[in-house]
Amino acid sequence: MNTFDTEKVAPISNQNEKVEEEEDEDELSPIEEVRLTVTNTDDHTQPVWTFRMWFLGLISCSILSFLNQFFAYRTEPLIITLISVQVATLPIGHFMAAVLPSTKFTLPGFGSKMVSFNPGPFNMKEHVLITIFANAGSAFGSGSPYAVGIVNIIKAFYGRSISFHAAWLLIITTQVLGYGWAGLLRKYVVEPAHMWWPSTLVQVSLFRALHEKDNDHRMPRAKFFCIALVCSFSWYVIPGYLFTTLTSISWVCWVFSKSVTAQQIGSGMKGLGVGAITLDWSAVASFLFSPLISPFFAIVNVFMGYALIVYTVIPIAYWVLDVYNAKRFPIFSSHLFTAEGQKYNISAIVNDKFELDEAKYREQGRIHLSVFFALTYGFGFATIASTLSHVACFYGREIMERYRASSKGKEDIHTRLMKRYKDIPSWWFYALLAVTLAVSLVLCIFLNDQIQMPWWGLLFAASLAFVFTLPISIITATTNQTPGLNIITEYVFGLIYPGRPIANVCFKTYGYISMAQAVSFLSDFKLGHYMKIPPRSMFLVQFIGTMLAGTINIGVAWWLLNSIENICHDDLLPEGSPWTCPGDRVFFDASVIWGLVGPKRIFGSQGNYSVMNWFFLGGAVGPIIVWLFHKAFPKQSWIPLINLPVLLGATGMMPPATPLNYNAWIFFGTVFNFFVFRYRKSWWQRYNYVLSAALDTGVAFMTVLLYFSLSLENRSITWWGTDGEHCPLASCPTAKGISVPGCPTNL
């Protein structure tokens, strides 16, 4: 990718006119999408290591880390994505270029080299580095680091302690470990033209659109952004404080105030969400990110899988078949239960060594899950297996051909242009890997009483992540699908080392997140490759950004965990309190299922859900059947459109996401990315991403303002409109003889 001045950018459709006539056509990218999106020129004289880049990068990274960690504990955990940073920093960068002094001066250590606070117009290369800086702390824009969840469940759910320095080391090492070996894999998955990383082209297109010169008289994007931000900021005071019921308007519950079944159907937060609507943007964009930035075909795929599972499979499993005594438990819940439908007392089965007390476990009985939660794990198993077999069947030959071509083919224009910049010495990556691994071993050996994982567990997790990074990077770079290792890692370690909940989640984090961070690191490098960013600048920005973000994340987490009473305990918090930690609740349950109790007692012969293991086989076989039908009936173009990994994984965010989140996301995504895109395409092209960023940013700023100005002072208002969604019976069981406080007794 190239750096473009606002006056120099050519329209995307004319990009090939910039290619020098003497260039051999063989040097052009062999991927058509890349040829149509990425320009083939580079101005290597444009500055990137500027005061503007450092200032905006550090500020953006700090704000993004603070906001995403702050929101992670809330019922609707809005995630501020890098697109918000892209849009928000553009006018600020141009403003700094207009007002900063351009006087040149020398700095100690730079010899006679002249530097300036304002080396010229704000350029696209600076903008790219600022965005990568801000996003460095999270894999694929996931917001809060995964390892913060470990700290949360130790302190909030288990009620145990972990020292701040142990928590900081855990977060930093899990975030950085994968960078070491990822850098050594760049020549396999970044430099080759056939490794094209489709998701990066979205960023390329957006950067070019933002930096193109406006040639018409329509409202400038910066002005539109400010107006939309003010509107979003002003409106959120209503659903965020004055009238919180607007977050989930579950009118079915209001009409049928005494019917458990009706509230199970109508509740947007605890039921199937039929008829539930929201006027709260944080509910729309929670978990699934902003629907305005998701292409319509992805929304359709998610809708198909979601509707099939939530509105067909779950009702049949609950009301018709009563699978696993489903009626004894809520229809939609991430809590763990006893056989009598009561919430399972996890604290009672944890001994003084923070391990499973088998006698107390036998006394309380087996753990039971809601039918939705149980099937969620089953579909998760199927999704992993189907992703591998789907990629093998439909993309296997393409992947192998592109990998062979990448190792034998000539350099394309982008790789050739990048040769003019100094490459990163290999010893940087070796040193980073060695230091991070050594610090991680120190953590496991000398602070083992806090994280439980043995040193051999760390080496095993790192080995798994290292082995899977290359094949998963190749799959991502060619198909835009990224299989995860989270369920596999927790399952395997749960079998090997049961009874220790924190050891299991630490193993999962080192095994899964170090791989995910490595793939994210490589994806950013491909973006830099297309944009012609000097590799050393890319590395330093990613590393510094990750260290800064991780430090801010644990600081915010530590502050909230120690300042909000009963944080994460939805049964102890006041009605309507936002500090319910839905993601951490699921993470905690996973630590119990896979670590404390162990998969043998849940999904094995000693548990209730051994049948769920067949989902692995079903998921693996499904795409093969689809592929065979495709080969048998090649003229039926609809058959290869059956993407089982997408269909089976559509509800992968549920729980903690709810039907309300999915319904609102699908609705707004369809409105903007189908109707507006089709009938007002020029408006969509100019303002869609800008609107998304403004809505996210406005909600985020108002939420923080409300917390510091009102919540910290315990200033609240209490009336019907602040008492939640008014569906108290949605969490009730319907089986006869099950008595739960607050629910009608079914005799």
Image (spheres, helix red, strand yellow):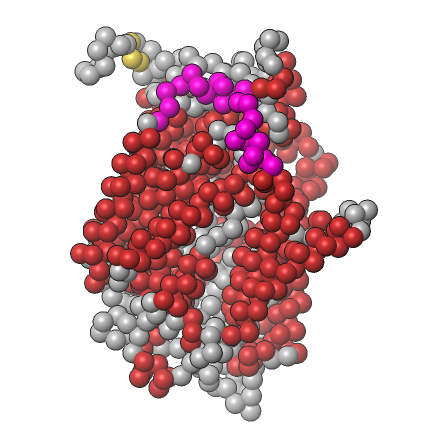
Quadrant in which residue 89 is drawn: top left
Looking at the rendering, which quadrant does residue 55 occupy?
Answer: top left
In this view of the protein, which residue sits in the foreground, 314 or 270?
314
Question: Is residue 416 inside the magenta stretch?
Answer: yes
Q: Is residue 722 left or right of residue 162?
A: right
Relative height, residue 521 to residue 254 (above, below) = above
Residue 744, percent from left and from top: 52, 84
Q: x and y percent of residue 454 in the render?
A: 26, 60
The residue shown at (37%, 24%) is: 423
Which residue extends farthest bottom? 747
Name the residue located 56 percent from the left edge and 34 percent from the top edge: 404
Is residue 98 toward the left or the right of residue 380 in the image? left
Tally the numbered discs: 0
Residue 209 visible here: no
Tell me the quadrant of the picture where the C terminus can be found: bottom right
Toward the viewer: 126 or 516?
516
* In the image, residue 482 lies in the stretch drawn in magenta: no
Q: Residue at position x 59%, y 56% from top?
A: 386
Q: Is residue 161 left or right of residue 617?
A: left
Q: Which residues are magenta?
A: 401-424
The spot of residue 493 in percent (x, y) is 38, 63
Depth order, front residue of 352/210 = 352
- Residue depicted at 48% across the width and 52% down the height: 484
Expressed as whole percent of the image width and height from the top left, the position of residue 664 reads 59, 53
Q: Which image quadrant for residue 183?
A: top left
Look at the picture and state if 660 lies above or below 634: below
Observer-nearest residue: 51 or 374? Answer: 374
Q: Is residue 586 left or right of residue 747?
A: left
Question: In this view of the protein, can residue 503 be seen by the observer?
Answer: yes
